[in-house]
Amino acid sequence: MKPAVPFLDLKAAHDELSNEIDSALLRVARSGWYILGPEVETFELAFAAYCEADHAIGVGNGLDALELALRAVGVKAGDEVIVPSNTFIATWLAVSRCGAVPVPVEPNEFTYNIDPSRIEAAITPRTSAIIPVHLYGQPADMDAIIPIARKHGLKVVEDAAQAHGARINGLRIGKMADAVAWSFYPGKNLGALGDGGAVTTSDADVADTLRMLRNYGSRRKYENEVLGVNSRLDPLQAAALAVKLGCLDAWNARRQSVAKRYLDELAGEPLTLPFVPDWADPVWHLFVIRHPDRDLLQKRLAEAGIETLIHYPIPPHQQAVYASCGFLSDATPMPLAQRFSAEVLSLPIGPHLTDDHVSQVISAVRQSLRS
Ligand SMILES: *Cc1c(COP(=O)(O)O)cnc(C)c1O
């Protein structure tokens, strides 16, 4: 049975813009230009401007954006890269794909983002970079992280896959680090009609290297300078993204108003609500609550027709791919990441959730906590 309140309605976002998107797709189809070219360049310029960065480089997906950004700032095989213990697996996979080792650092208990005060203890002579993740659309504490990186000569690559449009002290995420990786997976705040990704940066050399890396390591056709890949943002996706970018601020504002209602109307209930530091403007990719009896709460909400999801049920260090590889000794447990994975629950949020839906979610949560 279809839930009364779906977690996210992707088709509604498309329907709002379907005329413009349809004609953009047709324009690409009829142009005869199907790899990189003007549609990709137009979107790259618009997205860089939106992020207040000097350069945007469109790539195939968010995981490639992270991997290529790491390689462009100089991360190489054998390096260690500091990652949050509490993140989506792609953050770690990007490090592994460079032949480097992800070194997890536990989150702040209130923001769920990497805890800057725990980073220095994880730095070794092999550490070359830090990846802060703006998880759930809540900005990580870049003002604390960047000075630590500079002090130790480390590069910083932001994982902004969930944070299109978020701000720190009024400044957009997109250029504070050496490189910032984005995903346009359909469910993200800015989503394509398939896979897509980008890297933004204000470092011209990093941008230049990324343009080579995504295109066979080539600057000029049939001249290959570095070990590149084929990971180029598709012009069809770029054309659709350029249309959707025009709506991003309005959609984020709508998410913000849903979040405000949840925060106001669920305050005082016996659950943990998201915490927003006063320097942060989150974009509410997800609205994540915590409850010790999460599975029961999720079951009751499902019975009330409210679809919820868990981000994420298994932390990366407990995934089979990493649990068996031996670089994480038993001496480095990740109790916060583990606890959060057992307690987090994502309520429906998105630009097309109606006021009535929000009211239904709020009353169902209240009901479930009382029964
Ligand atoms: C979605 C996501 C990615 C990966 O993006 P893809 O486009 O799916 O490869 C990376 N990091 C985080 C935090 C994400 O949410």
Image (cartoon, helix red, strand yellow):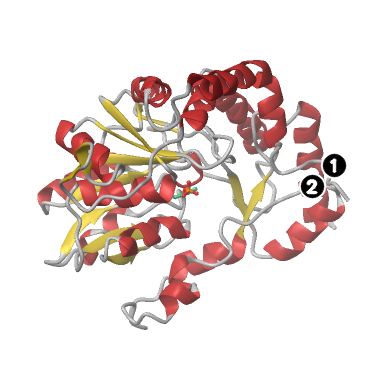
Rendered view: 214 above or below 175? below
The answer to whether residue 68 is left or right of residue 334 is left
Crowd rating for badge 1 (residues with CA inside 10 Å; few <14, some 14–19, many 20+): some
**Residue 4 disc label:** 1
Q: Where is residue 87 in the image (x, y as percent from the top left)?
A: 45, 56
CA gap, disc 1 to disc 2? 6 Å
Q: Position of residue 99 (x, y in %)?
A: 26, 66
**Residue 183 disc label:** none
The answer to whether residue 173 is left or right of residue 154 is right
Q: Position of residue 25 (x, y in %)?
A: 57, 24
Rendered view: 35 above or below 27? below
Disc 1 vs disc 2: Cβ atoms closer than 8 Å?
Answer: yes
63 vs 344, nearest the viewer? 63
Rendered view: 91 above or below 136? below
Residue at x-position 11% and y-position 66%: 125
Q: Which amino acid does label 2 sit on?
A: Ile
Rendered view: 25 above or below 174? above
Disc 1 secondary structure class: loop
Residue 170 visible at all? no
Residue at x-position 23% and y-position 37%: 221
Crowd rating for badge 2 (residues with CA inside 10 Å; few <14, some 14–19, many 20+): many
Q: Which amino acid does label 1 sit on?
A: Ala
**Residue 306 disc label:** 2
Tell me which corner region of the image, top left, top right, bottom left or bottom right, holds residue 51: top left
User: In the image as oriented, which residue stretches furthest toward the right?
Assistant: 1
